Amino acid sequence: MALLHSPLLLVVCSALAFRVLSRLLHALPVPKLVEKDWTRTWRWRNLSVSMVHSLLTGPGAVLCVLQFPDILTNVKDCSPKPAYLLLCASLGYFLMDAADIIMNGQAKASWEFLLHHALVISSFTYAAFTGRYVAGTTIALFVEVNSIFLHTRLMLKLCSAQDSPLYRVNRYLNLLTFISFRLGAHAFLTWYLLWNFLTLPHGTFFMTTVGTIDIVILVYFYRLVRADFFPKTKHLQGVRETYSEKKFLTD
């Protein structure tokens, strides 16, 4: 397949496809509570695109590992074609999403997303253009299974539906997939990098990147558990929501 020899073209095509998807979503109606505020409307549409990315890449990564189990034992050199296509498609999304955040004036409010995107983009770009660590990026995309429920949680919060049955069910699914797919995937990658550190090319770069994401994930896990399972009083919650109204990623 000719495209496999042109990672730049694959990434650009992916970014354009997600951009077109974003424009199409602009034509769809949003919940009434959301449409009253421009920032909420932008957040809703941004999360909708992210949801599509997660639905494609999360299950896709799992299927890749089931089809090519060598991914788990040869993180550096194993590079099946489906996994490579998944990598380039995901890289295109992260580039498009970072540009969308910045161009819509949401960089300050979404700095946590941008930090995550910068770390992912740097490591995914290396893998896409060198052909190394493609298996590692596939394992990293396991986190997108959890992102399905994480995005659902944020979208429900935008609708002020924290008391709905769907939110209550989703918070347990979110916690379960956070532990198994997000923490589990990064624990595996961290272990692999530490165990093989001396023999891996550019091991310091990947260890720094994965280690930084590990810290971000642990901080957010703490915030998630605190917010959904040990909530503060309604008064303090109201103060926090008012203070965090301009943030994209709130507890």
Image (cartoon, rainbow, N blue to C red):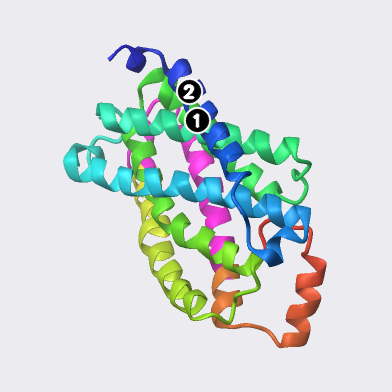
**Above or below: residue 204 compared with residue 34:** above
Q: Residue at x 67, y 37 (%)?
A: 100
Residue 84 percent location from the top left of the image: 33, 28
Quarter holding residue 229: bottom right
Number of residues whose C-alpha sits closer than 10 Å to that of mark 2, classed few (under 14), some (14–19) or many (20 or more): some
Number of residues whose C-alpha sits closer than 10 Å to that of mark 1, classed few (under 14), some (14–19) or many (20 or more): some
**Above or below: residue 182 compared with residue 196:** below
Task: Tell me, yes or no, whether the highlighted magenta stretch contains residue 126.
Answer: no
Q: The disc labelled 2 sits on which kind of residue?
A: Cys
Q: The disc labelled 1 sits on which kind of residue?
A: Ala
Q: Residue at x 63, y 44 (%)?
A: 26
Task: Say which quadrant the C terminus sits in.
Answer: bottom right
Residue 231 percent location from the top left of the image: 63, 82
Residue marked by disc 2 = 13
Which residues make up the magenta segment? 193-222
- Left or right of 232? Residue 90 is left
- Left or right of 144? Residue 216 is right
Q: Residue at x 43, y 21 (%)?
A: 10
Q: Look at the numbered disc 2 and give the secondary structure of its residue.
A: helix
Task: Say which quadrant the N terminus sits in.
Answer: top left
Residue 154 percent location from the top left of the image: 59, 63
Q: Look at the numbered disc 1 and give the secondary structure of its residue.
A: helix
In this view, the residue in front, 58 or 55, is 55
**Is disc 2 in contact with disc 1, using a CB cutoff of under 8 Å?**
yes
Residue marked by disc 1 = 17
Q: Residue at x 79, y 41 (%)?
A: 105
Quarter holding residue 160: bottom right
